[in-house]
Image (cartoon, rainbow, N blue to C red):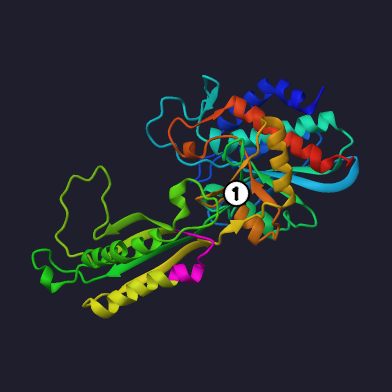
Amino acid sequence: MTLSDRITDKRDDLIQLTQDLIRIPTLNPPGENYREICDFLDKRLTKHGFQTQMIRATGTPGDSEKYPRWNIVARRDGAQTGECVHFNSHTDVVEVGHGWTFDPFGGDISDGKIYGRGACDMKGGLAASIIAAEAFIEEHPNFQGAIEISGTADEESGGYGGVAYLAEKGFFDPDKVQHVIIPEPLQKDRICLGHRGGWWAEIETKGEIAHGSMPFLGDCAVRHMGAVLSEFEAKLYPAMAARFTEMPVVPEGARQSTMNINSIHGGQKEQTDDFTGLPAHCVPDSCRIVIDRRYLVEETLDQVRDEVKALLEGLRETRPDFDYELTELNSVIPSMTDKTAPVVETVAKAIEEVMGKPPTYVASPGSYDQKHIDRIGKLKNCIAYGPGLLELAHKPDEYIGIDDMIDSARVMGAALETLLLPKG
């Protein structure tokens, strides 16, 4: 029996494993059931000879006694020394949202697809990597090196309670781990080499409260924010639209610099749904927006910051009584693995073997945990490769194709054979 046949024969096991993972509602925020899914993975992987560690990311954003940030790292050493291949998957999923026709945590099967929140992003990929590793160990019990599988927290909120923490603790030291595959849903015939950068900030415009019938006695912070948004529309958005990256970012629109206004709020706090009164009559003395600026590898983080600051300072100089406060919330530097890196060439060869065609090389419009493996772990030999369609992530009726998982697991298995079996 070949490894490919062995993986194909595990179809029912792969389906059940994916359903079991979906049925653990690891919602982030706030970070529910992280320990439960780590315990589940611990029981599964120890049965197949993996040694496991449970790591709580104490003190990271969101970590608390009610919502501890738990991670699992499992390792299976071969019969001989050699390199280590690490499969990293995040276990958290985003909120359910509206518009579902399937149970978000039911793991229902319809038309060759498994439905549920996290099916595509990325519990299907996690399941595929586990099946690939288990089948490889069964087929080649005397392999060289080691296989690691991690289930990590908080990727959907930056990864600081997951991969970032593990990288700080040395789990991705290049002396310990040589190849990393992250089974994010970038499609079974594509290799994701990296991602754009990101800068998140809050801008507050300030005013002076006064009676709403006499706004001339106050200073409306919302109108000041309107001036900020007008400057963005007139200057920043056209400037960003003129910039293009050589990175193979998908979809095409993400090859430009982009910025989203995540939220806006000014004036009185919104009341609860059971409040039936009327608003008071006040001039707002504060207005806040949160911006989500995604930038290209050809730009620098300082340029991104300075561009926004320059617009705000220009308003301070030209608009009467304009005052603002800019607070940086988070930043991510772009990451890009070279196409000649060993893990890239290995997975490319495996895709061609399994699917009969060369892969497409892409980069992600948003960031994922490669950023921490690269920047903190100093490990460059890292890609995202896994089953699923990226455009299904975070959507209602999210699903993963069963055949896609099988094919991706076969690719992962073929990559393991190249990396962990004796040459020749």
Q: Residue furthest bottom?
A: 317
In this rendering, is residue 266 above or below 87? below
Q: Residue furthest front?
A: 357
Which region shows up in magenta? 294-305
Residue 57 seen in the current view: no
Rendered-image quadrant of the C terminus: top right
The kind of residue tagged 1 is Arg
Q: Is residue 281 left or right of residue 192?
A: left
SS of the residue under disc 1 = loop
In this rendering, is residue 1 above or below 210? above
- Does the segment drawn in magenta span residue 297? yes
* Image-quadrant location for residue 309: bottom left
Give residue 112's position: percent from left, percent from top: 55, 21
Residue 177 seen in the current view: yes
Count the numbered circles shown.
1
Q: Is residue 323 left or right of residue 412?
A: left
Give residue 279's position: percent from left, percent from top: 17, 54
* Image-quadrant location for residue 174: bottom right
Q: Which residue is mark 1?
A: 69
* Image-quadrant location for residue 306: bottom left
In this orientation, which residue lies closer to the viewer: 239 or 324? 239
Give residue 23's position: percent from left, percent from top: 56, 29
In this rendering, is residue 273 above or below 160? above
- Residue in the image at 80% along x and 25% along y: 2
In this rendering, is residue 327 above or below 408? below
* Mark 1: few/some/many CA within 10 Å (<14, 14-19, 20+): many
- Residue in the image at 76% along x and 32% along y: 134
